[in-house]
Image (cartoon, helix red, strand yellow):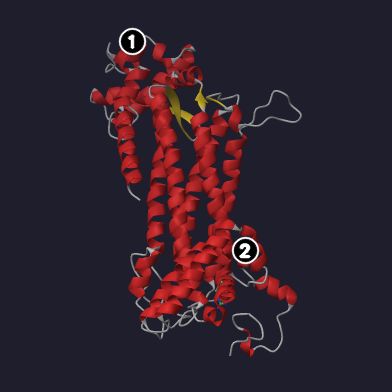
Amino acid sequence: MTERKDDRLWGGRFDRPPNEEFDAFQRSFAFDRRLLPYELAVDRAWAKALQGVGIFTETEVRQTLGALVKIAERAKSDPDWIDRFGAEAEDVHHFVEKALVEELGPLGWKLHTGRSRNELVATDFRLFVVDAAAETRAALIALMKAFVAQAKANLKIPMAGMTHMQHAQPILLSHFLMAHAEAFARDLTRLHSAAASADACPMGSGALAGCSFAIDRDAIAHELGFSRVTANSLDAVGDRDFALDYLFALSGIATHLSRLAEDFVLFASQEFSYVVLPDEYSTGSSLMPQKKNPDAWELLRGKTGRVTAALFSLFTTMKGLPSSYQRDLQEDKEALFAAHDQLVSMVHVAAGAVSAMRFNESKLAAAASNPALLSTEAADYLVKKGIPFRQAHDLVGKLLREAERQAKPWTQLSLEDFQKISPAFDIDVASALQLAAALQSKSVPGGTAENSVRAAISQLEQKLKSLENKP
Ligand code: ARG
């Protein structure tokens, strides 16, 4: 038989064509065409596997591989062809089969021997996620480098560290910047584990039960760059954990970007004026001539919802699914593609905006010199003189009240005033209650003392360097 009544992949047992609206509803080519390069790579590996079990002759495999190369080249050089030729395709798998038949005639119908779109789509999508994670990783590394460069350029600027949005203790601006870089370093780990979870080849799983031809699964996996094969055919066609893992990693990055954005939106407000917004990453008002708005950061914060929404969208799709492949799984791709595209551009914009950010040193330093920020230092001073911390805390509280009564900053009370509250205060108290001393005392690893920040910077730089050398 060299004729088929239509070119659908499954038309034989149907008498009537699908309802037009339903047909448009069920097609996925409009978005899964993005998987075409992966589909073609899987097809090449599958053609060789079929030769290995005697389904393809040497000539047939040569012709099939030649046609696959031609299709790949045409897709690259003539994207309009994909639109035209793909107009009738149900999905990317159908598209390639149609193109093969156009090239090869009935031989094009042979490649689908022993395999199912269920395993194909899972394999293509895993390959996509591995590449996507690499792209996100590269973007994230550039963002982290932007933080490191800013931390180095602003190493010694003090600022008022806050908890509950209240002045708490002095820190270095570089420490604040590195805090964000560290959060993104954790995201790199999550990206890595998402890629590892995608790194298993389902080919050979069939529709659900496995393949009835003794194809070499390891060889297919190896050719496609997978380090292992999936362990259970039923699980392999219905598993999208790797996509959830990747969306979770993206959601983590987006959430970190959103928190960063929140910091910078606040810091750009007139009340803070800690940062000078770069023109390149701001916009104005159509009505108020004076305005320069932190739109880059607001949009980064705002777009985060799309990324986390994709995670919840796929979780919700997965929740009610029985074992093996269900058509619901087709809903995985649009959400993940959109989240990936969105997130990569978010990270690019964030990296540019971080690099362009200028800091208002005098405003930051003025806030850091708020005497209230040194209260904990006074309690620590008393602890060093042998007073239990809780008592020291109370005594400093009294000192602050006394300063309030005298209407002056508490650091300017006289030594007598200090000693009235506790005789443990001595002449050296003045030098202990200095901004520089407070910063310097936080010299534990991970603390805000300049040396600790320098060490953190060089550790992160080393990590980035070693990551860059890895493929
Ligand atoms: N377009 C489908 C998807 O994205 C491909 C697999 C179709 N399988 C099927 N049995 N209809 O999931």
For the image shown, how many numbered marks are present on the structure? 2
Give the side of residue 113 with respect to residue 429, left or right: right
Q: Quadrant of residue 145?
A: top left
Which residue: 61% across, 41% down?
299
Which residue: 27% across, 26% down?
383
Label 2 element class: helix
Most foreground residue, 129 or 276: 129
Ligand 1 located in image quadrant: bottom right
What's the residue type where badge 1 is placed?
Answer: Leu
Label 1 element class: helix
Rendering coords of residue 379 (x, y %): 33, 25
Which residue: 39% across, 19% down?
399
> Is the Cβ of the residue at disc 1 closer than 8 Å to that at disc 2?
no
Quadrant of the drawing holding the N terminus: bottom right
The mark that comes first in sequence, 1 or 2, is 2
Residue hosting label 1: 415
Rendering coords of residue 235 (x, y %): 43, 75
Residue hosting label 2: 82
Residue 301 appearing in the image: yes
What's the residue type where badge 2 is placed?
Answer: Ile
